[in-house]
Image (spheres, rainbow, N blue to C red):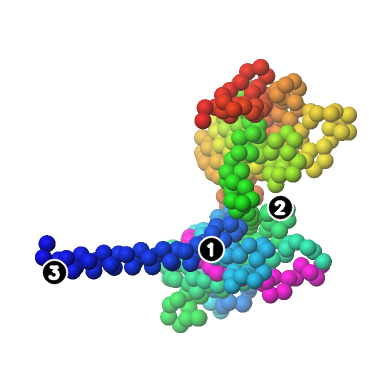
Amino acid sequence: MTMKNAKTALLLALFVYLANGSIAQTRSAKSPFIEKLRYTPWVVNHGWNAVHDDAGAWFKNLFTVNKYWNATPYPLRFSCEKWLYSKKDSSGRLRGWSVEFMAAYNRYGIGNILGDQPNPILVANQYKLFSFDLHAKYNFNKLYDLNKLWKSKDEIFQPYGTFGFGYTNRTLPAHPNTITLNVGLGFNVWIYKGIGIQIQSLAKFGLKDKFPNSGSNYLQHSIGIVYQINLKPKSEGDGYMNDFIRKMKETPWVVGHGWNVVQDDAGGWFENLFNIDKAWNAAPYPLRFTCEKWLYGKSDSATAANGWSAELMVSYNRYGVGNYLGDSKGANPLLVDKEYQLMSFDLHAKYNFNKLYNINKLLGAKKEVLQPFGTLGAGFTYRSLPSHPGCGTLNAGLGFNVWIYKGIGIQVQSLAKFGLEDKFPHAGSNYLQHSFSIIYKLEHKGGISGNRYKFKKHSIKKVL
């Protein structure tokens, strides 16, 4: 090796050594902040958004919802927010601040007004809008806590301001895409154990010519459900996910198999409701399957998931020839002319009302024999009908379980399914679905040999 190469190698080694030392110091300096940031809350949001696209200037016709607001019937706004402070953080430099990523989809209503007055431009086609935004948010309660005014110890009402940038893509002939500068206000109302409602309005300024009076400016309002996820430091447990997974392994599964009946908007929601002969469609064999996971145990009375469960449901049905289909008012109702099929796939959150008040006490029962519940979720329905062949649905319903003997029970349920199409919630794809099923509860059985679920005298072993 020459002297020159030796010097080069020595300098390179010295540079690597100094760089490693600098990185190690940087990591050491940042580690307290990063460690703290790991355990500050996350807030996720899912909801609706409405776009007021500079129709008649910023503050004209602001509340003329019918002609100036554009909105889809289904919730297609998503956000994920990371707090830079903890709940108890009252002195940190980032006190009150958070960072949020937001994505939204919308479409323009045909016939709505777009552009300036006195010669308004009407929307001729169903144009679409996509937006992606990154915001810094500040909780105004860190300046003065408004909750003190109504003597609340908890932070129920949480007003905030938001500032950031984004990108908007539109299928409009003019202003198809632009980068935006965003400013807005909003508030959260926390209702129950980390679940709340968020309302927000953003002014988005297109970074084009004539800024801030660019023709690509628009307002975006939103309302959604927010859920706060609190992570536990290692000193307080094994972490949120590990603790959640451990609890989930110990909660029961409930599987079901039964029949379903479809009343496909025959004469409106509540007309012909009990006209079984002409308005109800059912297959003679049981083709409804459910799999439900409880998020709480039998004796679980303190957990945040107390009373909640998640359910996957798959069902098949067919339309009876000669039955009502569509509006049966008048002398010539629309009738089913051949045997059409229907398949639905649904995911639901369910709540056991006995966790609010156990009605079994009124019956003098010591055990939970009768279990009424409510259900809310979304799904997809495929039909071989000429109209409304397939669409997403928003589902809401009521039902009850009757536990008969050692984990065997009966479930009766009715769901209203709202088609996520135009004229929501009065779309022609709406329908009612009733069901009757036999259900089986698989209880968790602890043991050192693995995770076990038992039903009656049988056991199902899950090998880890």
For disc 2, the neighbor class at 10 Å (few under 14, some 14 to 19, many from 20) is few
The residue to which callout 2 is attached is 193
Looking at marks 3 and 2 on the same chain, the residue that comes earlier in the sequence is marked by: 3
Lower position in the chain sequence, tag 2 or tag 1: 1
Q: Horizontal and vertical percent for residue 322? A: 62, 28
Mark 1 lies on residue: 32
Name, please, the residue furthest toward the bottom: 210
- Secondary structure of the residue carrying tag 2 is loop
Q: Are marks 3 and 2 in contact (CB under 8 Å)?
A: no
Residue at x-position 46% and y-position 82%: 210
Is 216 drawn above or below residue 328 in the view shown?
below
Frontmost residue, 207 versus 30: 30
Viewer-proximal residue among 105 and 150: 150
Cα distance between the residues tagged 2 and 1: 28 Å
Judged left or right of residue 244, residue 277 is right
Q: Where's residue 455, x and y in %?
A: 65, 22
Secondary structure under tag 1 reads: helix
Q: CA distance from mark 1 to mark 3?
A: 43 Å
Residue displayed at 43% across by 66% down: 25
Q: According to the image, label 3 marks what residue? A: 4
Vertical arrangement, residue 447 with respect to residue 41, above or below: above
Circle 1 Cα neighbour tier, 10 Å, few/some/many (<14 / 14–19 / ≥20): few
* Rendered image quadrant of residue 348: top right
Q: Is residue 396 left or right of residue 168?
A: right
Q: Give the amino acid type for the residue marked by disc 3 in the picture.
A: Lys
Q: Residue at x 56, y 37 (%)?
A: 345
Residue type, mark 2 in image: Lys
Write down the region rendered in magenta.
128-150
> Which quadrant holds residue 188?
bottom right
